[in-house]
Image: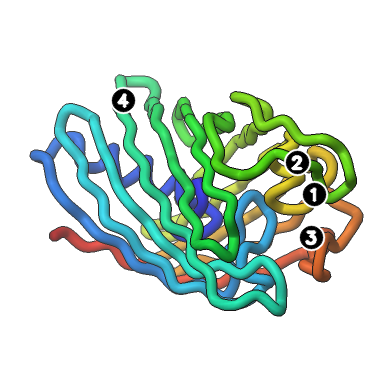
Amino acid sequence: MKASQGIFKFAALSASVLACFSAQAEWSANASVTNNYIWRGLTQTTNEPAVQGGIDYTSESGFYAGTWASNVQYAADDVFSYEHDIYFGYAGETDTFTYDIGYLYYNYDSEAEFDFGEIYGSIGFNNFTFTAYLLANTEADEGFSPSGDEQNFDFASAFYFSADYAYEIKEGLELGLHIGFQDGDFSEAFNGVENGYFDYSVSLAKDGFSFTVTTTDLEDAGPDGLDNDEVKFVVGYAVDFAL
């Protein structure tokens, strides 16, 4: 999903869901600010800051639902745009692993015009988490891609796979390692990236603050000089609170 803290929204959401299993059903909220909204290695704000936030409901049964929003900008001359996500799913854990399955809908204003949904699933074992996202539906016109090829946004025609490792270096300080792979016609239409690509990141997080170094294996800066081929340094602060 697209960022509760930009880069690691899915991991943050899963952690908050699992943390609530021993408690009764509850509502919570989150808010964050970052110098760059990164989604699957690519900037969603033309490398400018973002303010983000959401509300979540978590049941002791494992069911959860929530909504999340952020400002976005896909070209330097675009006017203000927003992303508004809605998601629901079921998460749980056993003695040896965690699991999470759900549906995520990305809603944009008329400037972006690329509303779409994904189904996702993850399995965690010790400090490792493996996640898959598949395109489920979209309201975007198929037409032709930026490279001139005919587009076909069928189910699972776009996908994202990722592997994450989290390790507590010392109390409260966590190291995160991430690798992901994105591909499919919809990916090209949405982010202007013609072929599949890998993204990588290393992060440190403590007391709501995070510092991330992220990049991709792309060799082109992308449309409007978005620096898709450059290393990016992302600083953010996030806070969660019960409602």
Res. 193 mark: 1
Mark 4 lies on residue: 93
Q: Is residue 161 above or below residue 76?
A: above
Whole-percent x, y for residue 229 in the image: 83, 59
Quarter of the rendering occupied by the C terminus: bottom left
* Crowd tier of the residue under label 4, counting other residues whose Cα lies within 10 Å: few below 14, some 14–19, many 20 or above: some
Q: Is residue 53 above or below residue 20?
A: below
Q: Earlier in the sequence, mark 4 or mark 1?
A: 4
Q: Distance from label 2 to label 1 (Cα)? A: 16 Å
Res. 228 mark: 3
For mark 1, give the secondary structure: loop
Q: State if disc 3 and disc 1 touch (CB < 8 Å).
A: yes
For mark 4, give the secondary structure: strand
Res. 143 mark: 2
Q: Residue at x 46, y 26 (%)?
A: 123
Whole-percent x, y for residue 7 in the image: 55, 55
